[in-house]
Amino acid sequence: MPELTGGEIIAKYLEKEGVEYLAGIPGHGSTNLLDGFNDADIEVLQPRHEQGAVHLADGYYRACGEPMAVFTSIGPGATNTVTGVATAYVDSIPLIVFTGAPQTHEYGEGILQEIDRQKPGDFPSVMEPVTKQSFEVRDVEQLPRTLRRAFQIALSGRPGPVHVDVPMDVQGAVADVELPEPTQSRPHSRPGGDPRTVSDAAELLADADRPVIVPGGGTMLSAAWDEVLELAEYLQAPVIPTFQAKGIVPEDHDLFVGYAGWIGSSAGNELASNADVVLAIGCRFSDLHTSSFEEGVSFDIPPSKLVHVDIDPQEIGKNYPVEVGIQGDAKVVTGQIRDEIESRMDPVSSENNEYYDEIQELWTEWEERVAERWSDDSVPMSISRVLASLRDVLPRDGIVVTSAGQPQETTNPEFPVYEPRTNISCGGFSTMGFGISAAIGAKLAQPNKPVVNLEGDGSFLMCASDATCAVEHGVDVTYLIVNNHGWTSIRNLQVNKYGWDRVLNTKFDEETDVNYMDLASSFNIDFAERVVKPENLDDTLERAIAHEGPAIVEAIVEEDNPESGAIITGEWDLADVEK
């Protein structure tokens, strides 16, 4: 074996893993690592912020199901990744983050950018709560084993990010090592459910009069879309996904009924709360999804009987008691349940089926409610009206990326998507600015699909600089900025809770607001247009999406609206000030 530096070992192992991209910003703490990629068959991407590098890798995985790697320097370059890593961790997105660290002979001496007051080289402690595991490599010969384990941990079981801290001298040290084969350190099958508990679940579902299926993010991670749809059609059971499973079934399918929770559909909440059996697959039951666990608003468990499937046993029964809990992979277990039900009963017909008729009636009522919002041509526009034009021009397989905030709160329940992995949206950590970089990752993962990042102006400004990464690398993404001149989602929340006289939340006025057309010019984005009237939206969006290279469309939308523009059908517990 030829002698390799630590940086070269990392590069060559990533090649073995099939990693196509490495994202990060060079620093003095990562120079030896980055040098190892000069001759690698891996493209190095350089966002303008380390948080964005992680979001880019996150969006890439969500769009194609393959992991990326991220690198940073020591110190603030490393700490800048934490928000991105936490976002991935909460949503169970696997990626590998390499950070620089002090030279091993200088640990604890407080060298430039070292965190050392609690213990030497203490940055891994920062990463521990937001990663599946954080490794420290103190010798170059440890690298092959560490890299193998890092990918194994990131991709196995419940996936998630893994951190590898690599001292500067280890990056540059030379060793004669053999790189392991990834396939020799991975499970070669997915875990199925215990046959007895699968049988118990099938019996409950076969006897149910009002079953509902609640797929969560775990179904998207395990690519269980075929199994979920086949089971739903066999039972004629409505599908009520979480937002992290948006796209798990086509949203024009007759068994899709929207979502449950605070901003769920009226149909989703009605059917979920009146089910006799709830089959939850890869679902966490968070506060937004459950209307903060208020009985009977989104779910009523018990008396509804819960069958809970999850690869992580800690999630089973965490927030609701289970009738049957099954640990296993979402794709495998869903298929097992369907097979077991097939052996017990014939497929349920939609003809002369009162439950099916109720599903269609409730969904029609919801669609009419959304259609009324989408057809409103008032000026300034609503975000709902922007969504209407975007859906008109975006092909069925187009990808929409959203961050936290008002646009996400409107897009998730209202905007229909039809294919898996075409809705990319940060979930449980609710991170502003996520979409700017995640959209770049999504486009790299799916170069033949149009990618639109729908972003609020407040969120866009959080990570706006990363749009220049799209320019540098020629990534064809469309940034659709819905500009309501401030952090309106939170401002409206403050108004609803306390009244206008107690709002501490600055509106962006003519003196403080950003001119996005000028910003686009300064970023060398050569397609940028502002739209004020809704009748101009379709044409502008069509041209932006067709444009080769990054594009910005700024849609001026209403500043103030009840409930931040969302249709509130559930509840969300946000404690008020008590006096």
Image: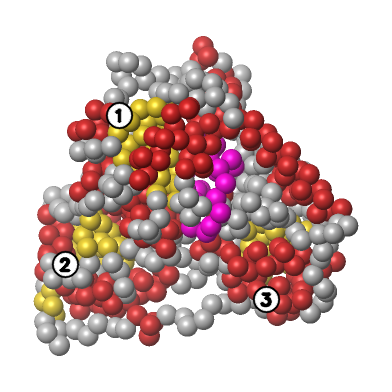
Q: CA distance from mark 1 to mark 3?
A: 52 Å
Q: Which residue is mark 2?
A: 37
Give above or below for 397 relative to 406: below
User: Can residue 148 be seen here?
Assistant: yes
| Quarter the N terminus occupies | bottom left
Residue 426 located within the stretch drawn in magenta = yes
Q: Is residue 571 visible?
A: no
Q: Earlier in the sequence, mark 1 or mark 3?
A: 3
Q: Which residues are magenta?
A: 406-430
Per the image, the residue denoted by label 1 is 516
Residue picked out by circle 3 = 336
Image-quadrant location for residue 442:
bottom left
Instruction: Please state the horizontal and vertical placement of residue 264, each as a whole percent of the image.
Output: 64, 42
**Residue 353 as seen in the image, left or right of residue 468:** right
Q: Is residue 268 left or right of residue 222?
A: right
User: Residue at 14% across / 84% down in the picture?
Assistant: 176
